[in-house]
């Protein structure tokens, strides 16, 4: 797991909001899970930003957009994480085609060497395809007014060319601070309501789930090999209403396809652990190890 950028709320040199260092990246080994490692970076280092959209493809980190001290940007950077000499160098990419408008808090899907970006909050783009909703509170601020959008852009990594996508179907409303995940040839977006984007046909499809009516923003989403999408954390209320942020530690699970017979069987064993405790040793070793891991995880888990 790689962490870059962001900002922090703390009194430093008279300021209460400041951007975190731009020339470092934090790495956490998900397999060994021992500790965090901080790596210094060189090259065309991006400005210090928050709300940028990052995705890792074949060991290369692509960083798009964000908000820095002078406003939103639509710059694109890449960082090769496969460096053999130990140094990590940023490279600013100059792409062909029309890029998305300068924005932050957008989402991205990955499909067949393409990065597909959706939504975000930033400046208005006159020749955009889609809907833009102005933020009325931004008109009195210094600089151009900003707002939310539901635009879709694709970046072809083989040629570094931007392509504006014309979508079909009644799509989601303009939004930002949502979360995206890819499964097969479909992109999923959750940010209060749930939508499917058919990458092959560019069609929006509404997705009905048991989590309707559970607002989230600033959360994360990821797809599993079991055909599920996990949404974690975020804020569960409307920050624009000036309410105190209701941070959530809940995990929302979206089942995209039926669970395997093995998965159903193991979950039944776990749910009946007291009844089957004397027979667990009959399981194959790798399945017994999985069951014991689930028992330990259940005992150590707290929150909702």
Image (cartoon, rainbow, N blue to C red):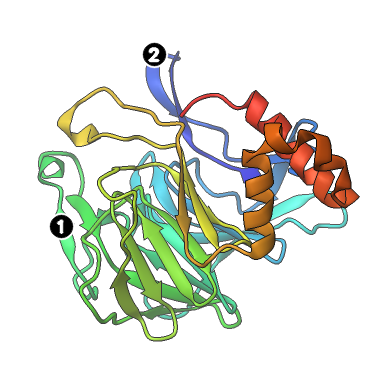
Q: Position of residue 252 (x, y in %)?
A: 44, 45
Q: Is 101 left, or right, of 33 in this rendering?
A: left
Q: Residues within 10 Å of mark 1 (few under 14, many from 20)?
A: some
- Left or right: where does residue 172 sit relative to residue 25? left
Q: Judging from the image, what secondary structure is the residue with disc 1 in? A: strand
**Image position, residue 36 (x, y; %):** 73, 32
Element assignment for label 2: loop
Residue 25 visible somewhere in the drawing: no
The image's mark for residue 133 is 1
Kindly indicate the quadrant of the structure image that contains residue 189. Answer: bottom left
Point 50% across, 62% down: residue: 76
Q: Is residue 87 above or below residue 235?
A: below
Q: Is residue 200 visible?
A: yes
The image shows residue 30, relative to residue 92, as above or below, that is above
Q: Earlier in the sequence, mark 1 or mark 2?
A: 2
Q: Residue at x 29, y 80 (%)?
A: 167
Give the distance between the C-alpha atoms of the residues marked 1 and 2, in whole angstroms.
34 Å
Q: In this orientation, which residue lies closer to the viewer: 216 or 66?
A: 216
User: In this rendering, is residue 61 above or below 31?
Assistant: below
Marking on residue 14: 2
Q: Nearer the viewer, residue 166 or 162?
A: 166
Residue located 82% across and 35% down the image: 278
Residue situated furthest bottom in the rendering: 201
Q: Nearer the viewer, residue 225 or 286?
A: 286
Percent from the top left, x then y, of residue 96?
47, 79
């Amino acid at each position: 797991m790689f962490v870059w950028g962001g900002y922090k709320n703390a009194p430093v040199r008279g300021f209460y909001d400041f951007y975190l260092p731009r020339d470092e990246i934090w790495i956490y080994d998900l397999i060994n899970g021992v500790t965090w490692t901080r790596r210094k970076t060189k090259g065309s280092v991006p400005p210090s930003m928050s709300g940028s959209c990052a995705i890792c493809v074949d060991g290369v980190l692509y960083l798009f957009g964000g908000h820095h001290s002078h406003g939103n940007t639509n710059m694109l950077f890449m960082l090769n994480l496969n460096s053999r000499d130990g140094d990590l160098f940023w490279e600013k990419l100059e792409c062909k085609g029309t890029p998305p408008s300068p924005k932050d808090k957008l989402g991205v899907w990955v499909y067949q060497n393409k990065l597909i970006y959706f939504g975000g909050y930033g400046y208005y783009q006159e020749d955009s395809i889609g809907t833009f909703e102005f933020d009325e509170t931004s008109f009195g601020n210094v600089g151009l007014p900003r707002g939310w959008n539901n635009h879709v852009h694709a970046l072809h990594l083989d040629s570094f060319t931007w392509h504006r996508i014309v979508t079909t179907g009644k799509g989601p409303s303009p939004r930002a601070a949502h979360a995206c995940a890819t499964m097969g040839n479909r992109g999923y977006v959750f940010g209060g309501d749930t939508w499917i984007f058919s990458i092959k046909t560019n069609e929006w499809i509404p997705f009905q789930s048991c989590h309707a009516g559970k607002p989230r923003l600033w959360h994360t989403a990821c797809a599993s090999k079991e055909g599920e999408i996990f949404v974690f954390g975020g804020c569960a209320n409307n920050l624009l209403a000036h309410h105190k942020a209701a941070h959530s530690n809940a995990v929302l699970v979206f089942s995209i396809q039926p669970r395997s017979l093995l998965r159903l069987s193991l979950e039944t064993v776990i749910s009946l652990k007291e009844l089957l405790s004397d027979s667990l040793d009959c399981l194959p070793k790798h399945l017994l190890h999985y069951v014991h891991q689930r028992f330990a995880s259940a005992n150590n888990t707290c929150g909702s």
